[in-house]
Image: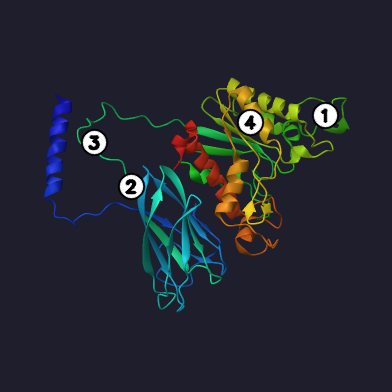
Amino acid sequence: MKAKLWCLAAGLLLVVALLVPPGSATAASTRYEAEAAPAVCTGTIDANHTGYTGTGFCNGDNAVGAAVQFTVDAAVAGTATLDIRYANGTTTARPADVFVNGVRAQSVPLDGTGAWTTWLTSTVTVPVTTGANLVRLSPTTANGLPNVDRLDVTAPGPSPSPCAPPSASPTSAPPRVTVWLAGDSTVAEPSSGTTCPVGWGNQFAQYFNGNVTVRNSAVGGRSIQTWLYDPNVTGTKNSAGECVVSPQTYSARWQAMLDPTNGMKAGDYLFIQFGINDSTSACPRHVGSARYQQLLGVMASAAKARGARPVFLTPAAAITCSGGTAVGNRGFIAETNAAASANGVPVIDLHRLSYTLYNSLGFCPFNGDYGAGPVGAFFCNDHTHFETAGARQIAGVVARALRDQQIPLASYLR
């Protein structure tokens, strides 16, 4: 009876909606400010020209490819409308290509607006997929982008179900979980007093709702073995060619994760990413192929024994160009996948996803100057470590992989 009454009420509401004059209501849109994470600005965040919304705007570098990127959510796949609010105080258009998930979808002229305090809106439509979408405005001339204030997105939504009865009881709040991170400098927190490098683990929490706590225990310069056994990995190899561990006592960081009171608990996640320092030929960092897989298994088993869910990641790629294409350059890819298969653990191929991201951002060919341009804004003064903006994008790639691979932690994403 209640369900029938609900359907009757829904039907009456539908009739009322049909009687509302056209144009009296508009589709809801979501606003993404260019100065606020997880947006990424290849340039500076400024506030010296009035008329912007939020707390500032993206003043991009004057260079081809010096992009601003937004992470846009869509409930279902379809066509989204993008309203780009910008100011171009010059008399010359500053055109840009619009990329969605690495694929060029549109181009926009972004003509002069008469003054840097005069803001106009340019509208385009683009295809989006279900979940998070990377929308990038990439300038096509050396003048770069105009100042970009925000992106308003009207994305497709699910069709309503007019006769769906109300829930019998309110849904309970999801349990709080902790995401534990084990890895090297590409994951780790920045050192005190420094701004580079910043690991993607430092930027990971912003992609989750308030029910997730990220505990980042990654440490720069570590292989999986030195991370687990610091300071007990010696400089001597045994007959099998592996570094001798003596005594075989776990590091304080791993013992903290194993602590029955304050460590991993049921429902938590353990993300594990190594494979960069492990390829060193000398001890203490050297780890052989079989040993690497064994230690991944040790960590996975310990997490599972406490009801936590391990996730393996292949190592983030450095920037290596083969002509105009970014290519892979890390080892231990096969070992990570093999250990994941042997232990029944999902694996996020961050190696492939990261160099795919570099290609979508147009990093190659690269002139080797880490002090300028989009590569300089992404990487420290080397080819491996991330600036904050780069770390944020890598963290976004990991977050998107959770959705794409339907890893249950994805239900906690914003």
SS type, badge 3: loop
Q: Which residue is mark 2?
A: 156
Marks 1/2: CA distance?
Answer: 55 Å
Instruction: Specify which label sits upstream in the sequence, 3 or 1.
Output: 3
Check disc 1 and give the amino acid type. Glu
> For the residue carrying disc 1, how many other residues have a C-alpha within 10 Å: few (<14), some (14-19), or many (20+)?
many
x and y percentages locating residue 268 in the rendered image: 54, 29
Would residue 341 appear left or right of 170 to someone viewing this image? right
Disc 1 is placed on an element classified as: loop
| Residue type beneath disc 3 | Ser
Marking on residue 337: 4
Q: Position of residue 58 (x, y in %)?
A: 50, 64
The residues bearing labels 4 and 3 have C-alpha atoms spaced at a distance of: 42 Å
Q: Earlier in the sequence, mark 4 or mark 1?
A: 1
Colouring of the image: rainbow
Image x and y of residue 238, in percent: 87, 26
Describe residue 182's horizontal placement relative to residue 78 as left or right. right
- The amino acid type, in three-letter code, at marker 2 is Pro
Q: Is residue 209 above or below residue 385?
A: above
What residue is pinned by disc 3? 161
Q: Which residue is mark 1?
A: 242
Foreground mark, 4 or 3, reads 4
* Count of marks placed on residues: 4
Amino acid carrying label 4: it is Asn
- Residue 400 left/right relative to 227: left
- Can residue 44 be seen by looking at this rendering? yes
At a point 66% along the width and 49% down the height, the residue shown is 190
Compare residues 353 and 235 and report the one nearer the observer.
Answer: 353
Mark-to-mark CA distance, 3 and 2? 15 Å
Instruction: Rate crowding at label 4 as few (under 14), some (14 to 19) or many (20 or more) other CA atoms within 10 Å.
Output: many
Q: Is residue 250 visible?
A: no
User: Would you place residue 353 above or below residue 346 in this image?
Assistant: below
